[in-house]
Image (cartoon, helix red, strand yellow):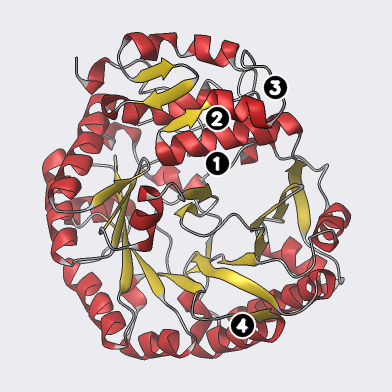
């Protein structure tokens, strides 16, 4: 029986970068509660920092991120000032000098802040936090607008890892998603990074794009492997035009059907593992010596709003418009609109406008889902015992997995639940069987594969 026989692969379910997912966020979490949560963090503990920059030089039609176009230096300067003001407020509430396990600059295109903006922001981070050789500092890059001088800036501010957006190298697909980016452009960006000593490089690809075929994907994978990045992430395109209006420029008639998407997912895993990359979770691949691969082999892989990570389980503080913080008490998200975000910060209050407080059930299910997404296995009896629950606590969820057990996608023995190699494409569906919030939810999601 091949993977195509698995149940529900075209079903829409969450991506589970968190649990509960953002679909369960509400205005019950506001700026005041978020400040209380920050102030309650144990003194001196490590934290991680994510800064969201919601600006790009041009919009790609496939993208569902919260971004807009700007080429205004003044706008970038103002935004850096807001990020710094938010950092000042956070440091005042959690105390200065906390060690950062990781700093991630994402977007959008954070390099659009410019050299002066990046240096200023980094100086403010260093003023309030402690960064050492163990801190990974990563940044997302658009190779189309990257230069050797910008690479020198990244080296100067301590960047240790860079993620390059590629999506697909086929000219036909690039035209269909409004992103013209020849392979040579990406190669030059990688050369510039390596020339300044930044050799931990990720490449992001997407399957299921308009006009994309398995042959085109194969060519893209081959060209990407030739560039020898440390990691390759290959995401399934999420067509969500009800949420991302720019996607309405993409005709649904040009999108690969469910069977073709499935073939692309299988092709990706076969090609990249054959090229020497280790499969990590459902959509990442890494060289064996990459920290993500090492974490996966030792059971230390984690998953958060930025995807798979080897960063320890510490509070994740998000700054910037739409940024999400993950704290022991729950999740808090800043206002999506930059004007609303700015208005809050200029009023000396946090821009937190929604989120959710974690219940004990949320913590239990979140643990199960994270282990399934990272390890493809979880000891349900152990989870129940540690949380003071009967071993029958997950019986209903297990019953919902009956079709996958019959199809050989899932094995359950003596409380140990494991997703088999042939069932890994159904991982999000297996997680959905435990999701207490999904039944009855009106939220719309992308398809499982």
Mark 3 touches mark 1? (CB < 8 Å): no
Q: Please give the residue where the numbered disc 4 appears in the rendered image.
A: 121
Residue at point 87%, 57% (across, down): 36
Q: Please give the residue where the numbered disc 2 appears in the rendered image.
A: 444
Residue at point 33%, 20% (across, down): 409
Identify the image quadrant of the C terminus.
Answer: top left
Q: Please give the residue where the numbered disc 1 appears in the rendered image.
A: 243
| Label 2 Cα crowd, 10 Å radius (few <14 / some 14-19 / many 20+) | few
Mark 1 touches mark 2? (CB < 8 Å): yes
Residue 389: assigned label: 3
Residue at point 55%, 30% (across, down): 444
Question: In this rendering, does residue 239 appear at all?
Answer: no
Q: Earlier in the sequence, mark 3 or mark 1?
A: 1
Q: Earlier in the sequence, mark 1 or mark 4?
A: 4
Left or right: residue 9 compared with residue 191:
right
Mark nearest the camera among 1 and 4 is: 4
Residue at point 12%, 55% (across, down): 222
Q: CA distance from mark 4 to mark 2?
A: 36 Å
Q: Earlier in the sequence, mark 2 or mark 3?
A: 3
Q: Is residue 292 above or below residue 12?
A: below
Q: Earlier in the sequence, mark 3 or mark 4?
A: 4
Left or right: residue 425 compared with residue 116:
left
């Amino acid at each position: 029986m091949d993977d195509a026989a698995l149940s529900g692969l075209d079903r829409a379910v969450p991506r589970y970068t968190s649990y509960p997912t953002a679909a369960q966020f509400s205005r019950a979490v506001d700026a005041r509660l978020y400040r209380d949560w920050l102030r309650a963090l144990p003194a001196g503990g490590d934290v991680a920092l994510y800064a969201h920059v919601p600006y790009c030089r041009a919009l790609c039609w496939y993208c569902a991120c919260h971004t807009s176009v700007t080429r205004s230096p003044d706008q970038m300067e103002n935004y850096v000032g807001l990020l710094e003001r938010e950092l000042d407020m956070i440091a005042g509430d959690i105390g200065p000098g906390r060690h950062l396990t990781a700093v991630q600059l994402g977007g959008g295109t954070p390099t659009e802040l410019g050299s002066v903006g990046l240096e200023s922001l980094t100086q403010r981070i260093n003023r309030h936090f402690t960064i050492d050789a163990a801190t990974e500092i990563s940044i997302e890059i658009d190779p189309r607008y990257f230069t050797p001088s910008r690479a020198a800036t990244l080296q100067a501010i301590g960047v240790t890892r860079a993620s390059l957006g590629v999506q697909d190298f086929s000219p036909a697909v690039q035209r269909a998603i409004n992103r013209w980016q020849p392979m040579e452009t990406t190669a030059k960006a990688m050369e510039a990074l390596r020339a300044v000593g930044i050799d931990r490089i990720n490449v992001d690809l997407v399957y299921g794009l308009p006009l994309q075929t398995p042959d085109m994907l194969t060519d893209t994978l081959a060209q990407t492997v030739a560039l020898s990045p440390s990691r390759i992430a290959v995401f399934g395109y999420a067509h969500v035009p009800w949420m991302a209006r720019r996607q309405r420029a993409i005709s649904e008639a040009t999108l690969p059907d469910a069977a073709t998407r499935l073939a692309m997912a299988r092709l990706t895993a076969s090609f990249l593992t054959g090229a020497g990359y280790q499969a990590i979770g459902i959509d990442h691949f890494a060289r064996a010596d990459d920290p993500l691969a090492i974490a996966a082999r030792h059971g230390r892989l984690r998953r958060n709003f930025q995807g798979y990570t080897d960063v320890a389980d510490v509070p994740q503080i998000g700054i910037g418009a739409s940024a999400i913080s993950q704290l022991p008490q729950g999740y808090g998200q800043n206002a999506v609109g930059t004007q609303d975000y700015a208005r809050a910060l200029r009023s000396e209050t946090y821009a937190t406008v929604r989120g959710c407080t974690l219940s004990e059930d949320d913590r239990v299910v979140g643990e199960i889902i994270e282990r399934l997404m990272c390890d493809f296995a979880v000891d349900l009896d152990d989870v129940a015992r540690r949380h003071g629950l009967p071993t029958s606590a997950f019986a209903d969820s297990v019953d919902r997995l009956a079709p996958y057990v019959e199809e050989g996608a899932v094995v359950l023995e003596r409380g140990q639940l494991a997703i088999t190699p042939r069932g890994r494409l159904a991982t999000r569906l297996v997680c959905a069987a435990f999701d207490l919030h999904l039944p009855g939810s009106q939220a719309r999601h992308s398809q499982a594969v």
